[in-house]
Amino acid sequence: MGEERRKKKEKKLKEGEKVVMMACCPEGEDAEEIKEKVLMKISEKLEGRSNVVMTRLNDEDLKQMDALVEVEAFKSRSEAAAFFIKEGIQARKDLFQKVMPTVEKIRELKEQAKRSLGKG
């Protein structure tokens, strides 16, 4: 039974590598080199994850994420979600650059209000 399970896992891994290759790989590069690059990129994006956020997803989004977990592109749903949130923030960097000065000012004003009420 253990040998059969190992063979199934190896088959899934190979299928997963094919999916990753089809999704991200320029032609002509060595598969192992590409796999390492993808895993390093994912690892870099996931450093310093110590905060917990609960979210709800629709069925299709969850199905897509689960597929990546199943082929072991990510270790867990949490890791996949963290990666895609990070990518989304990076993709909309311009939005955050515009809004952050206003957010900082709001935080300052809140602190001033708390101090004036003797709560800060």
Image: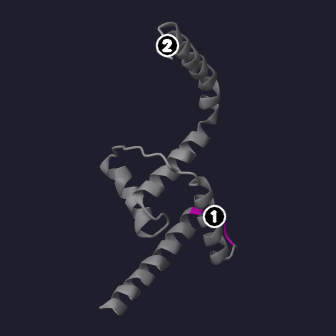
Residue holding disc 1? 40
Residue lying farthest to the front in this orientation: 118
Q: Above or below — where is 20 with respect to 64?
A: below
In the rendered image, residue 57, in percent from the top left (x then y), is placed at: 34, 46
In the rendered image, residue 61, in percent from the top left (x then y), is placed at: 38, 50
Q: Are marks 1 and 2 in contact (CB under 8 Å)?
A: no
Residue at image point 52% right, 7% down: 116
From the viewer's side, name the closer residue of 21 and 38: 38
Residue holding disc 2? 114
In the rendered image, residue 37, in percent from the top left (x then y), is placed at: 65, 66
Q: Above or below — where is 101 with respect to 60?
A: above
The magenta stretch is 24-28
Q: Main secondary structure of the magenta part?
A: loop
Label 1 or label 2, whichever lies nearer to me, is 2
Q: Above or below — where is 78 with respect to 86?
A: below
Q: Secondary structure at mark 1?
A: helix
**Going from the N terminus, do you reach mark 1 or mark 2 first?**
1
Answer few, some or many: residues within 10 Å of disc 1's Cα (few below 14, many 20 plus, some between 14 and 19).
few
* Residue 29 is covered by the magenta coloring: no
Horizontal side of 97 relative to 13 (left or right) equals right
In the rendered image, residue 4, in percent from the top left (x then y), is placed at: 34, 90
Q: Secondary structure at mark 2?
A: helix
Q: Above or below — where is 70 with respect to 114?
A: below
Residue at image point 41% right, 43% down: 53
From the viewer's side, name the closer residue of 116 and 66: 116
Q: CA distance from mark 1 to mark 2?
A: 44 Å
Residue at image point 49% right, 50% down: 82
Residue at image point 64% right, 31% down: 94
